[in-house]
Image (cartoon, helix red, strand yellow):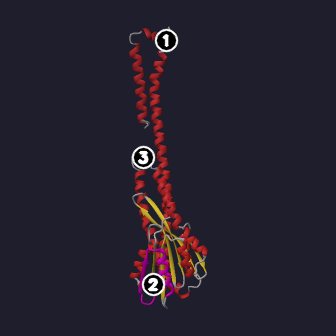
Amino acid sequence: MKHAREMECVIYDQGSGRSEFAECELPDEACRLALKQLRGLRDGEFAWVRVADPSEDELVQLSEELGLHPLAVEDAVQAQQRPKRERFGDVLAVALKTLWYVQEETAVETGEMMLFVGPRCILTVRHGAVDPCAEATRRLDADPDMLRFGPWAVLHAVLDVVVDAYSDAAEKVRAALDRLEDQVFSSSRVDHTEGIYSLKREVREFRDAVQPLVPVVQGLLSEPGEGDRRTKIAPYVRDVTDHLQRTDIEVRTLDELLNSVLDAQQARVSMWQNDDMRRISAWAAIFAIPTMVAGVYGMNFEHMPELGWTYGYPMAVGLMALASGALYRAFRRNGWL
């Protein structure tokens, strides 16, 4: 895997809201710079270290300074975790999935993010194309009062951005489903089963990101050792939880609606097949009349009075046409043709 070679470190002053930003594209220099800033923290300051697609060596260097457990480093490097919450001593680890909707492909794409929240530092490890940290930084800069919560302010900002992205993706998936419904119930005889299954797969991937995150965010308020800070930030976390629960309900609803649309599509396909079978059967019955009459007069029996009659042939053709016409009219009246 080619790493993005991206590492950033921001030092925040909880009292004044002042921030110092440092970025470096070279991994070794970035690690040394981040470690230097972490060791130089003064009272009232905390650090936010942001890493994108890191190597194991890069995280090991940071983990020694932050006191991360080796299992936490392994989880952050592998990036194959379900949303979860774990505590390693003084460090709270939160894994979640980032998500965005690709309009051109009608697809939900996901990435992964792990946040390690310590007393004076938060480390975010990102895998995937979308970076919620940029928007989270903008929101913190716009509301420096949140910095009084320390690293939990960053945790809240990132969660808020991720959940907002979930809501935006849910709206776009709903719009795609509405278009699919219109197509399924249109007068055209087009089978949209493949498109329904494709969108259903995307919604299931959406559910895998949203549903497990609900108890994770809800459980943040029960984390030990946060004391007064947890009490003060509780309304903000509950607000994120409410938005996440609404999105979870919406995604469940989308999944159920897709089941209904799939059932409707299958019913329409079955109806089209029945219509085709009725038409085939009706035409078979119509052509059976002249076939039967022609078969009778084609048996070459010696004593067939009609064969010597002047009007025998016109009568046979007329009988075939009359019987076929009567059947055709009857089938049209009953909707078979």
Q: Amino acid at mark 1?
A: Asn
Residue 308 place in picture, x, y as percent:
43, 8
Nearest the viewer among 194 and 9 is 9
Residue 21 is inside the magenta segment: yes
Disc 2 element: strand
- Closer to the camera in the image, 285 or 66: 66
Q: Which residues are magenta?
A: 14-40
Query: Circle 3 — which element?
Result: loop
Q: Which residue is mark 1?
A: 300
For this rendering, which residue is in front, 316 or 163?
A: 163
Kindly identify which residue carries mark 2: 11
* Circle 3 Cα neighbour tier, 10 Å, few/some/many (<14 / 14–19 / ≥20): few
Residue at figure coordinates x 51%, y 71% from the top left: 54
Pair 3/1: label in front: 3
Nearer the N terminus, badge 3 or badge 1? 3
Asked if one can make out residue 159 in the rendered structure from this viewpoint, the answer is no
Mark positioned earlier in the residue sequence (1 or 2):
2
Nearer the observer, disc 1 or disc 2? Answer: 2
